[in-house]
Image (cartoon, grey):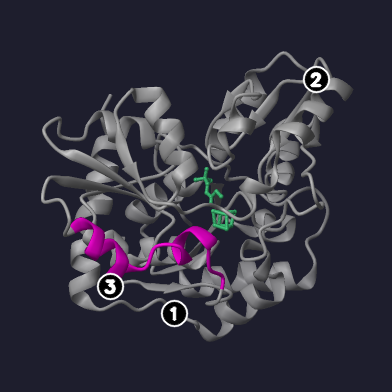
Amino acid sequence: MFNAPEVQSPGVRRPLPAGPPDVLSREILELKRRHNAVILAHNYQIAEIQDVADYVGDSLGLAQHAAKTAADVIVFCGVHFMAETAKILNPDKIVVLPDKDAGCSLEESCPADKLAALQATNPKFYTIAYINCSAAVKALSDCICTSGNARKIVEHAPKDRDLLFVPDENLGGWVMEQTGRPMTLWKGNCYVHIEWTHAAISRIRREHPDAPIVAHPECTRAVRMLADEVCSTEKMVTYCRQSPSKSIIIATEAGMLHRLRRECPDKVFIPAPTERCACNECRFMKMNTLEKLHDCMTRLEPRVELPDDIARRARRSVERMLEISALP
Ligand code: 13P
Ligand code: SF4
């Protein structure tokens, strides 16, 4: 049985909800036992996957759990860069994911060769990479961050270096506002989070004047400035638990609503509307299904494999992040 360690990003580890799980879920739990596997799932995964996972959380909590697990097999339900991070931290373990094509628009926006070319223009650059990037980009970076620790990572960056923040310009802009530290920002964004607009959020605020707005830092500044709280998905859980409000407006990917409803069953969560469409689902996160999870646990495929050199260099920058994160 997987023992969740004490971590800053607590996530959730609960038995399945009341009532018998369906056949597929039961078989997944049996495969988990047979392989001595741990199932790690991001907050944006579909409800059925969250409900069979050992741990559900944000990118930081998932990396912290991956770094400490005693399981032989890590089954990662999230997008590819998250599973890759688990492999970076566990080169000798088997890491599988339900769908190898589950990418991320931020990762796509920052090819390693283009980053290397920019780094070559300034030898004083200290590169901080948001964890939503490839292992090759992590290998080129000095330190990794997540939305849950970006501020702390920037505050601990060497004062005599010029900061280069990749690949999310919105998260980077938010951290600059928090820390006052100037940074060169890569021009990448999350295709889901930029769909929320100032106009759409203002409208929902007028409809629910008593409901606070919680937004992810990948949202644009125009949206962040309307929010009562801007934070990572895990910190959203803490905020909502502590808030005296009965209704809360959530501006992040739709999977988060399942996690929040489980954690705070007495509250009403209102998905913030987007301007052009109801597109608050990440198509990459939603590529994972219970069937694909069952299949990958049966075959122990597809696996994440990485060239040794990239994995070794990427591990340095991920471990630096975990060390700084653990500081008081
Ligand atoms: P969190 O680390 O806050 O869960 O965010 C991950 C992500 O991909 C947001 O789009
Ligand atoms: Fe990437 Fe955005 Fe999907 Fe998160 S929600 S995995 S940042 S595309």
Q: Of helix, strand and loop, which one carries label 1?
A: loop
Q: Amino acid at mark 2?
A: Lys
Q: Of helix, strand and loop, which one carries label 3?
A: loop
The span shown in magenta is 102-119
Magenta span includes 240:
no
Instruction: State the residue position of label 2.
Output: 246
Mark pair 3, 1: CA separation: 12 Å
Compare marks 1 and 2 and give the one earlier in the sequence. Answer: 2
Residue at left offset 37%, top offset 37%:
150
Percent position (x, y) of residue 235? Answer: 54, 31
Instruction: State the residue position of label 3.
Output: 92
Q: Is residue 186 above or below residue 173?
A: below
Q: Are marks 3 and 1 in contact (CB under 8 Å)?
A: no
Q: Of helix, strand and loop, which one carries label 2?
A: loop
**Disc sitting over residue 303 in the figure:** 1
Residue at left offset 45%, top offset 48%:
168
